[in-house]
């Protein structure tokens, strides 16, 4: 049973047609039953509803009458550099046919074309990378913004990531600019940890850190996060990485940690470690502490988002909600599987070894195999298999 979204009558609904591949949108329904009847007749590949609430959801965009919008975050492996992406994700420029692996570029490095054919896959490393980013986001939203864990709705997206929805009245009326401020905070954009009274020196057009600058962190918000991140990096980084930052940082590692230098902001107590080094360490802390999100999704107050309880058209897996405290334990490759009965015979052109539904499958190369429906559906939707006799 597909869960009913809140404020159902004020949301726009949309769905993507399977064969024709066009979006039907600007739909309004008075009941969930009426909506389900439409889905049963049309059998779309993907189903969406608006993050926004409208007075007239079925009218054109400028006539809908925007009331407000949920605060929504999308964490997707498409936007996170992972080592596995260079193995199983491929892109081909539609203009010159130049190809590559990993994250799809904004434009082709050969012809500057901006249209690509993309083949992605999902593996445990992809999903784990997005789970880590989601955990950081939840931590920021609860500790820094003050949302209770039960005010956050956390979902596996059905593909290679997670969605986090905030439906609180406090955020509903925020405009795009205000949401951009939230995005900047979550991603750590524009952080400044230097004393404001300091001045920069410029030599031959290049700015460098002057000796008069003072490194300064208080114990609130991002400043506190940087402190904790600096301690974490210092505690877990390899000796090589610390030496690259500053050999004196490596030599004084034990002193810094035991004497609580960072916690107590005693930056001048460490000989040979100046402002420039503390800044480099803070930058590493920012990377560790910030959440990698799709910034466009959060700032778009008219965004359509995949509907909870429906299938993702690229995998056949469910978008499914689970409690925030279950984030570490939730396994999408078993718990988001929709098809749990029957089998299908398919010809698999090419697929890596992968895990789904409690078992491991592949690798395949031009193989005819009988597979559980969920496995066959994923391979077909990924363009790697077709039904055969």
Image (spheres, rainbow, N blue to C red):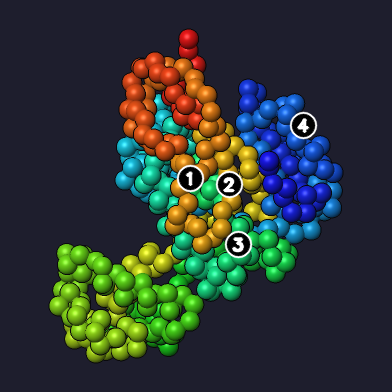
Q: CA distance from mark 3 to mark 4?
A: 30 Å
Q: Is residue 183 left or right of residue 310?
A: left
Residue 197 appears in which quarter of the rendering?
Answer: bottom left
Using the rendered image of the protein, determine whether residue 35 is visible from the camera's viewpoint.
Answer: yes
Q: Position of residue 240 (x, y in %)?
A: 17, 64
Q: Which of the 4 image quarters holds residue 255?
A: bottom left
Q: Which residue is mark 4?
A: 38
- State the mark number for residue 320: 2
Name the mark on residue 152. Answer: 3
Which residue appears farthest toward the top when viewing the image?
389
Q: Residue at x 37, y 75 (%)?
A: 228
Q: Secondary structure at mark 3?
A: strand
- Contact flag, marks 2 and 1 (Cβ < 8 Å): yes
Q: Regarding mark 4 in the picture, which secondary structure is present there? A: helix
Q: Which mark is residue 332?
A: 1
- Find residue 32 and report its horizontal and vertical position in percent: 78, 42
Dots 3, 4 in contact, CB < 8 A: no
Mark 2 / mark 3, whichever is N-terminal: 3
């Amino acid at each position: 049973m597909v869960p009913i979204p809140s404020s159902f009558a004020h949301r726009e609904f949309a769905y993507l047609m399977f064969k024709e591949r066009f979006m039907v949108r600007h739909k309004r329904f008075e009941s969930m039953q009426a909506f389900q009847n439409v889905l049963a007749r049309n059998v779309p590949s993907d189903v969406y509803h608006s993050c926004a609430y409208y007075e007239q959801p079925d009218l054109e965009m400028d006539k809908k009458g925007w009331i407000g919008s949920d605060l929504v975050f999308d964490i997707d492996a498409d936007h996170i550099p992972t080592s596995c992406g260079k193995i199983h994700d491929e892109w081909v420029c539609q203009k010159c046919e130049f190809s590559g692996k990993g994250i799809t570029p904004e434009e082709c490095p050969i012809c500057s074309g901006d249209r690509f054919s993309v083949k992605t896959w999902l593996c445990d490393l992809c999903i784990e990378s997005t789970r880590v980013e989601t955990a950081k986001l939840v931590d920021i939203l609860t500790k820094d913004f003050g949302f209770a864990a039960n005010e956050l709705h956390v979902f596996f997206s059905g593909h290679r990531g997670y969605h986090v929805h905030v439906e609180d009245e406090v955020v509903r009326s925020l405009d795009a600019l205000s949401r951009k401020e939230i995005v900047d905070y979550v991603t750590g954009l524009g952080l400044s940890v230097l004393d404001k009274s300091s001045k920069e020196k410029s030599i031959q057009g290049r700015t460098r850190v002057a000796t008069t600058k003072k490194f300064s962190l208080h114990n609130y918000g991002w400043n506190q996060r940087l402190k904790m991140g600096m301690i974490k990096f210092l505690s877990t980084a390899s000796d090589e990485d610390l030496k690259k930052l500053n050999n004196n940082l490596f030599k004084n590692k034990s002193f810094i940690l035991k004497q609580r230098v960072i916690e107590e902001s005693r930056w001048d107590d460490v000989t040979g470690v100046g402002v420039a080094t503390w800044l480099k360490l803070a930058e590493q802390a920012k990377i560790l502490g910030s959440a990698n999100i799709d910034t466009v999704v959060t700032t778009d107050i008219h965004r359509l988002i995949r509907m909870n309880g429906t299938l993702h058209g690229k995998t056949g897996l469910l978008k499914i909600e689970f409690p925030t405290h279950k984030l570490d334990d939730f396994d999408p490759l078993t718990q988001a599987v929709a098809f749990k009965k029957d089998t299908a015979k398919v010809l698999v052109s090419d697929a890596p070894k992968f895990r789904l539904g409690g078992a491991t499958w592949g690798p395949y190369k031009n193989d005819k195999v009988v597979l559980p429906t969920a496995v066959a559906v994923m391979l077909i939707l990924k363009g790697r298999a077709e039904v055969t006799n």
